[in-house]
């Protein structure tokens, strides 16, 4: 089990788009294993490779109640998103101590390379959809708070700074 440290905001990798993964290799599978271990140790519902310092388009998501159902994704992209939105309180280990309610599509269809190196299309709903979209944002160099108005974003970052001083 290898739990990796999450980069602190505003690390440059968290603001930059990640690189596509050309093929699924043993190294990629090892990265996924570390990512699942790190996600489970937080605990969290998902993790993008950039959060632990890997500039690759890799993500893991596990919103199952019993855990152990992680979906491993390389180069994920949203193909379709529902019009109906769902509010969820989102946070990130890269900016601890704060969270915000974000409205995202309730359901998405995502295309990604799976662990077998095959392209897969999968539908995600509710918390699974929220987490997948959150991770895809990370891979594009965005944080959840980038969905907030400038004023709310500024207030959230100020709260995070105060929390960091106390921690």
Image (spheres, rainbow, N blue to C red):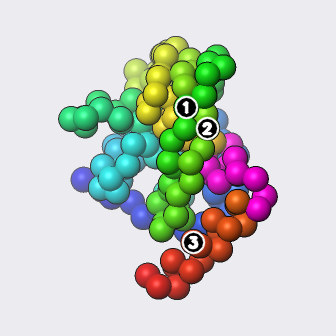
Which quarter shows the C terminus?
A: bottom left
From which residue to which does the magenta span run? 138-151
Residue 26 highlighted magenta (yes or no):
no
Q: Which of marks 3 and 2 is in front?
A: 2
Contact (Cβ within 8 Å) of mark 1 with mark 2: yes
Q: Residue shown at 52%/79% (left/top)?
A: 164
- State whether residue 86 is above or below residue 14: above
Question: Callout 1 environment at 10 Å: few (<14), some (14 to 19), or many (20+)?
Answer: some
Question: Which tag, 1 or 2, sits closer to the chain's start?
Answer: 1
Q: In this view, does 8 lie above or below 147?
A: below
Secondary structure under tag 2 reads strand
- Residue 13 in the image, given as x and y percentages of width and height: 65, 58
Residue where numbered disc 2 is placed: 103
Residue at mark 3: 160
Task: Tell me if mark 2 has few (under 14), some (14-19) or many (20+) residues whose alpha carbon lies within 10 angstroms of its own.
Answer: some
Q: Earlier in the sequence, mark 3 or mark 2?
A: 2
Q: Name the residue under label 1.
A: 86
Picture coordinates of residue 150, whole percent (x, y): 78, 58
């Amino acid at each position: 089990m290898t739990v990796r440290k999450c980069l602190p905001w505003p690390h440059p990798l968290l603001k930059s788009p990640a690189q596509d993964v050309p093929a699924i290799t043993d190294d990629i599978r090892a990265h996924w294993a570390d990512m699942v271990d790190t996600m489970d140790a937080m605990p969290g519902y998902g993790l993008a490779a950039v959060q632990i310092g890997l500039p690759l388009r890799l993500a893991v998501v596990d919103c199952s109640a019993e855990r152990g159902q992680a979906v491993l994704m390389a180069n994920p992209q949203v193909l379709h998103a529902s019009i109906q939105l769902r509010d969820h309180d989102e946070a990130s280990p890269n900016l601890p101590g704060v969270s915000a309610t974000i409205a995202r599509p309730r359901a998405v269809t995502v295309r990604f390379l799976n662990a077998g190196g095959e392209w897969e299309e999968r539908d995600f709903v509710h918390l699974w959809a929220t987490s997948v979209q959150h991770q895809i944002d990370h891979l594009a160099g965005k944080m959840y708070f980038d969905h907030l108005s400038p004023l709310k974003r500024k207030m959230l970052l100020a709260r995070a700074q105060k929390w960091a001083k106390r921690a």
